[in-house]
Image (cartoon, rainbow, N blue to C red):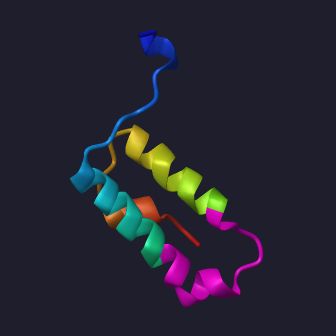
Amino acid sequence: MDLCNSKPVYDPPTLAVLRRALDEVLSDHRFLKSTSTSALEIAEFILAQAATGERDRAKNAGPL
């Protein structure tokens, strides 16, 4: 396997944290009213944070 092109692999507990972070943002009234940020952008942000090792849901959720 080429490590330069490898993608992060997350264990089930980490995936659960990432999913909860995404669910929290997508159900937040600020997101529901927002027209400037898509669900895909939020998911990409959360994954980018996780790829750097971040596991704090509050930080993963990011600004709306």
Tell me where residue 38 sits by quadrant.
bottom right
- Image quadrant containing the N terminus: top left
Looking at the image, residue 39 sits to the left or right of residue 25; the answer is right
Q: Position of residue 9 (x, y in %)?
A: 35, 36
Q: Decide whether residue 14 is among the magenta residues.
A: no
**Residue closest to the far right:** 35
Tell me where residue 43 sits by quadrant.
bottom right
Q: Position of residue 8 (x, y in %)?
A: 40, 33
- Image quadrant containing the C terminus: bottom right
Which residue is depicted at the point 36% across and 69% down? 20
Whether 3 is drawn above or below 35: the answer is above
Whether 42 is drawn above or below 6: the answer is below
Whether 11 is drawn above or below 31: the answer is above
Q: Decide whether residue 32 is among the magenta residues.
A: yes
Q: Position of residue 23 (x, y in %)?
A: 45, 74
| Count of numbered labels shown in the rendering | 0
Looking at the image, residue 52 sits to the left or right of residue 17; the answer is right
Q: Main secondary structure of the magenta part?
A: helix
| Range drawn in magenta | 25-39
**Residue closest to the far left:** 13
Whether 4 is drawn above or below 13: the answer is above
Tell me where residue 34 sits by quadrant.
bottom right
Looking at the image, residue 43 sits to the left or right of residue 37; the answer is left
Which residue is depicted at the point 64% across and 59% down? 40
Looking at the image, residue 8 sits to the left or right of residue 63; the answer is left
Which residue is depicted at the point 65% across and 58% down? 41
